[in-house]
Image: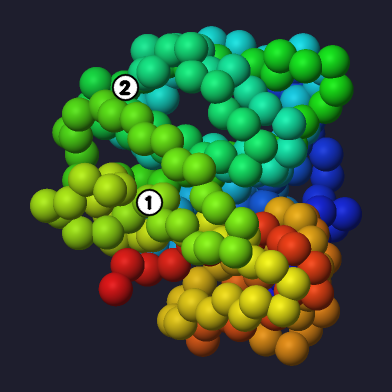
Amino acid sequence: METLKFDDLTQGGFAGLIERRFVMDQRVFGSSKKPGVFDGIGNFVYLADANFLPKGETGMHSHKEIDVISVMVDGRVSHAGSLEHGQSLQSGAAQVQRAGAQGFKHNEINPDDTENNMIQLWVMPDEAGEAAGYKMYEPKQGEVTHIYGGPKGQDDTFYGGTSISVANPDAGQTIEQEGKVMAYLTRGKGTINGEAVNGRTLVRSDSGVKFIPEEDSQLILIYLTQ
């Protein structure tokens, strides 16, 4: 098992936010990949932990043939763009934007006078040429919510061979995921496979993870769809 901690990384950012990038897969970033940053698994290629400055925003920008997943850890953002313009993402919620061949433009805006905290992940689609689309999720405390990946023929999530779930376990509520998995603890603390971990830590394991939280926590799981 490998771990990567927030304080291990250099702070970067753009526009109205500061961030630290935990995953920059060479398939997408090539020689621009930063030292010490992990590659992804499956089609998962990017993870950044960002704080928007007060009233900060990303600025309008575009994506094509990539799926962009945003998980709100603390605070909120107002979503503007070509998909579901005007949507508001509250603390704990997640949005998934599929760019497809059509692509989309978006600007994520912090409407408040305090910093917020949002995790952004990118996954390459299994097949090029999909239609653009948008999905919104509100994971509940004490539950695990599947927000990305799965088979064709269902509408709960965008299909894909790489899956993402958001777990919000109570203290003492064990969360397990088999196989090759990456797990990002956004907040809280506990143990993963017997090793103590605190918030803002990324774990990579080829043989599954078992998380036992010492307090209410949030864990983002990235794994290969069964």
Query: What whole-number distance in Å separates the C-alpha atoms at marks 1 and 2?
Result: 18 Å
> Image point 87% across, 54% down: which residue?
7
Q: Position of residue 100 (x, y in %)?
A: 26, 31
Task: Name the quadrant of the N terminus.
Answer: bottom right
Question: Would residue 112 be found to the left or right of residue 73 on screen?
Answer: right
Q: Position of residue 215 (x, y in %)?
A: 80, 68
Mark 1 neighbour class, 10 Å CA radius: few under 14, some 14 to 19, many 20 or more: many
Q: Is residue 207 above or below residue 221?
A: below
Question: Would residue 37 be found to the left or right of residue 144 on screen?
Answer: right
Question: Would residue 190 be found to the left or right of residue 25 on screen?
Answer: right
> Image point 26% across, 27% down: which residue?
132
> Image point 44% across, 81% down: which residue?
179
Q: Mark 2 — residue?
A: 103
Contact? badges 1 and 2 (CB < 8 Å): no
Task: Name the quadrant of the C terminus.
Answer: bottom left
Q: Position of residue 133 (x, y in %)?
A: 29, 29
If you read the primary sequence from the N terminus, does the residue marked by circle 1 or circle 2 appear first? 2
Of residues 206 and 26, the one nearer the viewer is 206
Of residues 183 and 35, the one nearer the viewer is 183
Q: Is residue 109 above or below residue 197?
A: above
Q: How is the image coloured?
A: rainbow
| Residue 25 visible in image | no
Q: Mark 1 — residue?
A: 148
The outermost residue toward the left is: 153
> Image point 74% across, 72% down: which residue?
171
At label 1, the amino acid type is Tyr
Classify mark 1: helix, strand or loop: strand
Mark 2 neighbour class, 10 Å CA radius: few under 14, some 14 to 19, many 20 or more: many
Question: Would residue 169 be found to the left or right of residue 87 on screen?
Answer: right
At label 2, the amino acid type is Gly
Classify mark 2: helix, strand or loop: loop
Task: Give the foreground label among 1 and 2.
Answer: 1
